[in-house]
């Protein structure tokens, strides 16, 4: 039986949810996700979970924050005056921000008349993620 190895190109159907069962992403209803097993194209816990799976096999994996979207870092939150943001901005909106030559993605985590809290953490930082995986197919690096 052929099993996925690190470096193989894999095609996976998945459903991703947080611990309360809320689904935040899924490939179901569309094409499977294609990536290199053990690579950095998807979160590490997902990428490593397919190693050892055979085509047609399914499994559920629980991925800790450090192997998913990272630990939450409070220092990545910044309070800014509300009036520097677009007038139609709402909590949850994402946009690019920058200091000097650096730009990064931030999202609005809190908003009132006077200020906003901009957060550069991934919205799922600090959360355990559960993936339901089905390995659809693989292309072995060995040919």
Image (cartoon, rainbow, N blue to C red):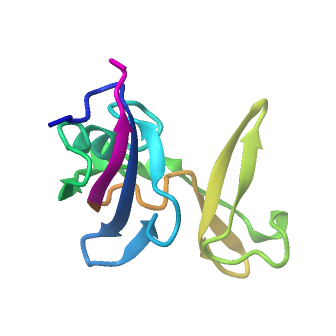
Magenta stretch contains residue 62: no
Q: Which residues are magenta?
A: 133-143
Q: Quadrant of the C terminus?
A: top left
Residue at 74%, 42% (x, y): give it. Answer: 98
**Name of the residue lying farthest toward the left:** 1
Q: On the picture, is 140 further left or further right than 101?
A: left
In the displayed structure, would residue 81 be above or below residue 4? below
Residue 59 in the image, given as x and y percentages of width and height: 18, 58
Residue 3 sits in quarter: top left
Residue at 28%, 78% (x, y): give it. Answer: 21
Q: On the picture, is 64 further left or further right than 28?
A: left
What secondary structure prevails in the magenta region?
Answer: strand
In the displayed structure, would residue 82 be above or below residue 129? below
Q: Toward the viewer: 49 or 92?
A: 49
Q: Toward the viewer: 80 or 123?
A: 123
Residue 117 in the image, given as x and y percentages of width and height: 60, 65
Residue at 37%, 52% (x, y): give it. Answer: 12
Q: Quadrant of the N terminus?
A: top left
In the displayed structure, would residue 91 be above or below residue 54? below
Q: Toward the viewer: 109 or 30?
A: 30
Residue at 56%, 51% (x, y): give it. Answer: 120
Magenta stretch contains residue 141: yes
Residue 111 in the image, given as x and y percentages of width and height: 64, 76
Residue 17 sits in quarter: bottom left
């Amino acid at each position: 039986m052929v099993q996925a190895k690190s470096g193989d190109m894999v095609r996976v159907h998945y459903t991703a949810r947080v611990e309360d069962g809320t689904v935040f992403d899924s490939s179901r209803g569309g094409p499977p996700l294609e990536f290199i097993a053990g690579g950095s194209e998807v979160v590490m816990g997902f990428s490593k979970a397919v190693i050892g799976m055979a085509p047609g096999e399914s499994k559920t994996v629980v991925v800790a924050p450090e192997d998913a979207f990272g630990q939450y870092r409070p220092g990545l939150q910044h309070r800014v005056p509300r009036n520097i943001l677009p007038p139609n901005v709402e909590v949850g909106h994402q946009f690019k921000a920058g200091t000097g030559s650096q730009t990064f993605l931030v999202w609005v985590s809190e908003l009132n008349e006077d200020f906003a809290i901009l957060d550069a953490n991934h919205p799922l930082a600090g959360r355990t993620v559960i993936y339901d995986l089905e390995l659809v197919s693989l292309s072995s690096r060995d040919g």
